[in-house]
Amino acid sequence: MARTGIERVDLKGLPALRLATGSGASAVVSLFGGQVLSWTPPSGGDRLYLSPQAANDGSRPIRGGIPVCFPQFADLGPLTPHGFARTANWSVLTERSDKDFALITLGLSDDESTRALWPHGFKAELSILIEESRLDLEFEVTNSGDTEFEFTAALHTYLAVREVEQSRLEGLHGYSYRDKTDGNRIKRDSGDVVLIEAETDRVYHDVQRPLLLREYSRSLGINAEGFADVVVWNPWIERSAALADLPNDAFRHLLCVEAAAAQHPLRLAPGDSWWGRQTLVAL
Ligand code: TA6
């Protein structure tokens, strides 16, 4: 039987932590990127997609799991897309577990290499909790410098789906979104559900409702606090084929539903903090 609690593991060369609870939930978190790579609730079946072709040598972002995009979401600024947090080495700040839960907090703060890219003092913390059928990620940023800064961010969650064409994402009806596949036009979602039938790359604005991802025989509740926006991304056939770290048919098995602060950059005065959370519940 797998061990419960928190243990150090080596994931094809990447230092990682494995979290496991007495009820049978588990997660694997890479310190490179501060990235959850796997989450299996007690009912079984990994709910996160991790590419079998993901880089694991620390040279490139890991394709899959939950990359942390900070201090820039996508190409919304001068930094390399999605910022540097997903290619930084995070440290373990705290770890706690009991038979029902496992919780770790990872930390990242400015150093010479981050200040060369982004000249600000910051402390970021990512708390990852597994409990029963729930995965909770809380991301907190503090301005530890002496000047104000702005940032955008996201938890770029790659959800595993059995067949994306058969999956239905509920809860986005009526919200406006920026459609990156159509010249960044602003549109309004008029469907009852979001169906993936083509390349999809949308930033939904100011989403106030929990979402539900339905598949044949299982569902996933998705909730966020603090993050105003929801990004829905599926690369579909051509982009899957074009991305070297994704198998050609990967588009069929993944759907990114991301908690993001993208439309309006967040602004922090010296000493101030912001936090945002994404919660997934396996149903
Ligand atoms: O969050 C959606 C997105 O910004 C897309 O535009 C897409 O390119 C994706 O992220 C993946 O980005 P990456 O830099 O990891 O290839």
Image (tube, grey):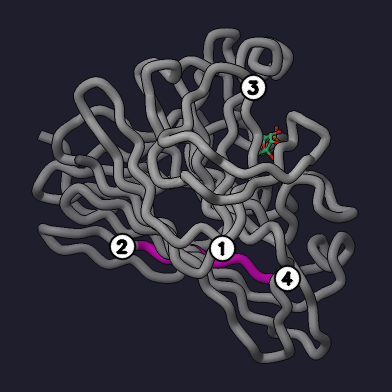
Type of the residue with mark 2:
Leu
Residue 45 image point, x, y percent: 25, 28
Label 1 crowd (10 A; few <14 / some 14-19 / many >=20): some
Type of the residue with mark 1:
Ala
User: In 3D space, how far apart are the residues under numbered discs 3 and 4 (Cα atoms)?
Assistant: 36 Å
User: In 3D space, how far apart are the residues under numbered discs 2 and 3 (Cα atoms)?
Assistant: 35 Å
Residue in view at x 39 percent, y 70 percent = 94
Of residues 131 and 170, the one nearer the viewer is: 170
Residue in view at x 31 percent, y 62 percent = 103
SS type, badge 4: loop
Q: Which residue is mark 1?
A: 228
Furthest toward the front, the residue is 190
Residue 260 image point, x, y percent: 59, 55
Q: Which residue is mark 2?
A: 103
Ligand 1 picture quarter: top right
User: In 3D space, how far apart are the residues under numbered discs 1 and 2 (Cα atoms)?
Assistant: 25 Å
Type of the residue with mark 4:
Asp
User: In 3D space, how far apart are the residues under numbered discs 4 and 1 (Cα atoms)?
Assistant: 25 Å
Q: Which residue is mark 3?
A: 199
Which of the marked residues, 4 or 1, is nearer the chain's N terminus?
A: 4
- Range of residues picked out in magenta: 104-109
- Magenta stretch encompasses residue 44: no
Q: Is residue 134 above or below residue 44?
A: below
Q: Which residue is mark 4?
A: 110
Q: Nearer the viewer, mark 4 or mark 1?
A: 1
Res 55 quadrant in image: top right
Quarter of the figure with the N terminus: top left
User: In 3D space, how far apart are the residues under numbered discs 3 and 1 (Cα atoms)?
Assistant: 23 Å
Which of the marked residues, 2 or 3, is nearer the chain's N terminus?
A: 2
Quarter of the figure with the C terminus: top left
Of residues 125 and 134, the one nearer the viewer is: 134
How many numbered badges does the structure rendering display?
4
